[in-house]
Amino acid sequence: MSKTSIKRRRSGRVSKPGDPPGKTKLIAALRHLLEERDFNSITTAEIANAAETNEALIYRYFGDKRGLLHRVLAEYLQQMLDRIDAHCESIEDPMEQLEAFIWETFDIYAKHRVFAKIVLFEARCFQGYFKSEAYQLVRRYAHQFYDTIALCIENGEFRSDLPTRQVRDSIIGMIEHLAMHDVISGKTMDPDQYTRTISEIVLNGLLTRKSSPKKAVKASEAGKVLALQ
């Protein structure tokens, strides 16, 4: 691993140009319905009607309604990872990369509550999720988080006496706990404030004695121009 940069893990695109129109319409229809409705209350007939296509195509392309949900989630995750890659490529300092990672996650949760609801509440309750393409993208996200923390340790910024995996899980757990409260309550989420909080409580607590505490969130300046489509 380089001492100044990190090679980003990339995967193939979720959306494929050759996807049949009916498949694309079903994905878009469920995304739209989830803006107003709970997933369990939405029927396959309603999805097909909104997509102006045949209900049988849900089973043909996705296996069932939950398979379609996993595809919707995978598309959101791919866009999130693309944003993180684009943002971090312009940053050499691994500590700032980590802050950018955190900020982008909060910003996407703040702007796309459907995505936040699926990933934080809905998907993990069912075994099929852990065999889905969406879960593989979540693993990629977690691996990139791990790699960035490992680079902070390698560069001597973070303490080396703490297990990298548990450090990563603690940071992701804090992100999700803060986000869950706002998603449930409908409260406006502030990516700058939450990134600053995590940086001050967690990241600065991981610094070695020779490292000086850093002020969080230069991340937001670049991140705000990378709007999720």
Image (tube, rainbow, N blue to C red):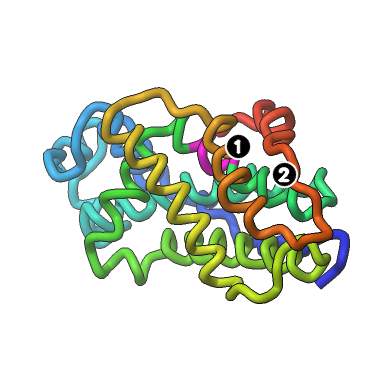
Residue 6 visible: yes
Q: Quadrant of the C terminus?
A: top right
Task: Please identify the quarter of the rendering in which residue 116 is found.
Answer: top left
Q: Give the residues drawn in magenta, as a range.
A: 103-108
**Residue behind mark 2:** 86
Element at label 1: helix
Q: Position of residue 82 (x, y in %)?
A: 63, 47
The residue furthest front is 209
Counting other residues with Cα less than 10 Å from the Cα at mark 2, is it few (<14), some (14-19), or many (20 or more)? some
- Please name the amino acid that badge 2 sits on: Ala
Q: Which residue is mark 1?
A: 196
Rendered position, 7 above or below 119: below
Tell me what residue is drawn at x 36 percent, y 47 percent: 23
Residue drawn at the location 38% of the way across and 53% of the way down: 71
Q: Look at the image and say whether residue 72 sits in the magenta stretch.
A: no
Q: Position of residue 211 (x, y in %)?
A: 81, 55
